[in-house]
Image: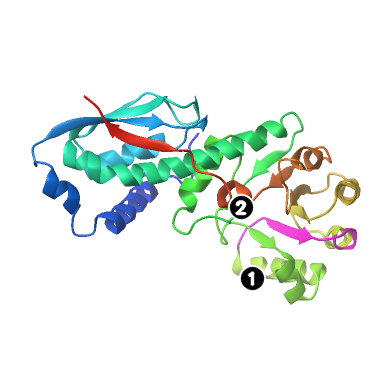
Amino acid sequence: MRPTYLTEKSISEFIASALAEDIGDGDHSSLAAIPNDAQNQARLLIKGDGILAGVELATYIFKAVDPDLQVAVLLQDGAKVKYGDIGLTVKGKAQSILTAERLVLNCMQRMSGIATYTNSLQQLIAGTGAKLLDTRKTTPNFRMMEKWAVVIGGGHNHRFGLYDMVMLKDNHVDYAGGVREAILATQRYLQDKGKDLKIEVETRNLQEVKEALDTGGIHRIMLDNMDIDTMREAVKLIGGRYEVEASGGITETTIRAVAECGVDFISVGALTHSMKSLDISLKAYK
């Protein structure tokens, strides 16, 4: 199922902005070197192993550049791919193929890298019941596509932005004067504004976990940068009263142990800020 933030309008606006950035007043390389009526074809070549993402987006990009381009999808989003696979072919006006090429590749390479890394971490926690979440550590103006890639890779999206959930992080807590003060102020704010938003509070130690529990009126408690033993104790203290999320410095070597502590969610910023793009190219062929 496509995430709710992916509407026809949001996708179209993203593509229009990205094309305007790239094309400016014209793709002069293609306009100069290629006859206006030249027809050609190209195929998307996969040059690494991973999970393919951005195929559906690529079809939107090609059609936005030139509605007459014919795209044949050979591998869908989420497909496991290897070196030498062909993801899709595109036929039509040669100038149009070249104009769309870089935006298609930029999106698909990054999205596929995110989906690949997400999938690898998801496999490490399989069977534990913990869900893998992304964060807001995303590329400005590309968040929608990066979060889409996380979903394609088998992960789950955290809040999309600052507006759709309240997360009281360490700085909020410190500026507010403590966990209890931050929670109570937030509850008053939401009541005054008539907003129905879930509240998550970040805790750094067991004392803050206890303070969050004593205050109540929240939805989720984040355990930030806690060691495994402390995390287990925190989960025991919470006792299922609220959702529990683990976060902070979680890697491939620690994520399984974190999941086995009994947390409901594990958020990993590296899904979108430290992944490696999958090598993909678009090549003309006869």
Kind of element beneath mark 2: loop
Residue 18, given in percent of the width and then of the height, sits at 33, 54
Whether residue 7 is visible here, answered yes or no, is no
Residue 178, given in percent of the width and then of the height, sits at 81, 71
Whether residue 141 is visible here, answered yes or no, is yes
Q: Residues within 10 Å of mark 1 (few under 14, many from 20)?
A: few
Give the Cα separation between the discs numbered 2 and 1: 28 Å
Residue placed under numbered mark 1 in the picture = 192
Task: Name which residue lies at 18% across and 50% down.
Answer: 29
User: Which image quarter: residue 265?
Assistant: top right
Task: Name which residue lies at 67% across and 55% down.
Answer: 198
**Which mark sits nearer the N-terminus, 2 or 1?**
2
2 vs 1, front mark = 2
**Are discs 2 and 1 less than 8 Å apart at CB?**
no
Q: Is residue 51 left or right of residue 203?
A: left
Residue 8, given in percent of the width and then of the height, sits at 36, 44
Q: Compared to 225, does 185 lie above or below?
A: below
Q: Compared to 13, does 52 lie above or below?
A: above
User: What's the magenta region?
Assistant: 195-208
Q: In this view, does 125 lie to the left or right of 194?
A: right
The amino acid type found where label 2 is placed reads Thr
Quarter of the image for the C terminus: give it: top left
Task: Name which residue lies at 46% across and 27% down.
Answer: 83
Residue placed under numbered mark 2 in the picture = 135
Kind of element beneath mark 1: helix
The amino acid type found where label 1 is placed reads Asp
Q: Compared to 96, does 143 lie above or below?
A: below
Asked if the stretch drawn in magenta spans residue 146, the answer is: no
Q: How many marks?
A: 2
Residue 100, given in percent of the width and then of the height, sits at 27, 43
Q: How crowded is mark 2: few (under 14 residues within 10 Å), some or many (20 or more)?
A: many
Nearest the camera: 272 or 178?
Answer: 272
